[in-house]
Image (cartoon, rainbow, N blue to C red):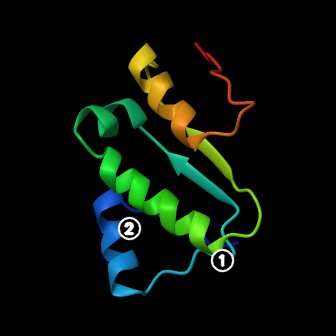
């Protein structure tokens, strides 16, 4: 199993350079999602997810982690998650 870790900006850079392959991707984890979205990284997240959708024939597991999940984060998450998306409070 390989693990690739990167900021959204760095991943977008790899996409633009054509040196990242998502065809074997099984899971995507977005950590500190509330902070990334609050700082304006939604367009980068969208670029990454669009590229994944272009090359993937089957669904992948997407996990969005956040210390807080305000309503506006939930609303944005619904755009990217499967219809059976749910918020799990681990506190």
Residue sitting at x 69%, y 39%: 82
The answer to whether 27 is drawn above or below residue 25 in the figure is above
Say if residue 24 shows up in the picture: yes
Residue sitting at x 38%, y 67%: 11
Q: Is 51 left, or right, of 54 in this rendering?
A: left
Residue bearing mark 2: 11
Q: Is 48 left, or right, of 8 in this rendering?
A: right
N-terminal of the two: label 2 or label 1?
A: 2
The quadrant of the picture occupied by the N terminus is bottom right
The quadrant of the picture occupied by the C terminus is top right
Q: Are marks 2 and 1 in contact (CB under 8 Å)?
A: no
Figure label count: 2
Q: Is 62 left, or right, of 41 in this rendering?
A: right
Say if residue 70 shows up in the picture: no
Q: Quadrant location of residue 37?
A: top left
Horizontal and vertical percent position of residue 28: 58, 54
Q: Residue furthest left?
A: 39
Q: Quadrant location of residue 15?
A: bottom left
Horizontal and vertical percent position of residue 54: 58, 71
The answer to whether 71 is drawn above or below residue 38 in the figure is above
Q: Quadrant location of residue 35?
A: top left
Local secondary structure at mark 2: helix
Residue bearing mark 1: 23
Mark identifier at residue 90 = none
Q: CA distance from mark 2 to mark 1?
A: 15 Å
The answer to whether 46 is drawn above or below residue 68 in the figure is below
Local secondary structure at mark 1: loop
Q: Residues within 10 Å of mark 2 (few under 14, many from 20)?
A: some
Residue sitting at x 62%, y 21%: 87
């Amino acid at each position: 199993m390989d693990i690739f870790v990167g900021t959204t900006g760095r991943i977008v850079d790899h996409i633009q350079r054509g040196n990242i392959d998502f065809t074997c991707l099984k899971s995507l984890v977005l950590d500190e999602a509330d902070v990334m979205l609050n700082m304006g990284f939604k367009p980068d997240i969208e670029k990454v997810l669009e590229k994944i959708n272009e090359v993937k024939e089957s669904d992948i597991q997407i996990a969005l982690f956040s210390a807080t999940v305000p309503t506006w984060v939930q609303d944005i998450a619904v755009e990217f998650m499967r219809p059976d998306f749910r918020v799990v409070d681990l506190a």
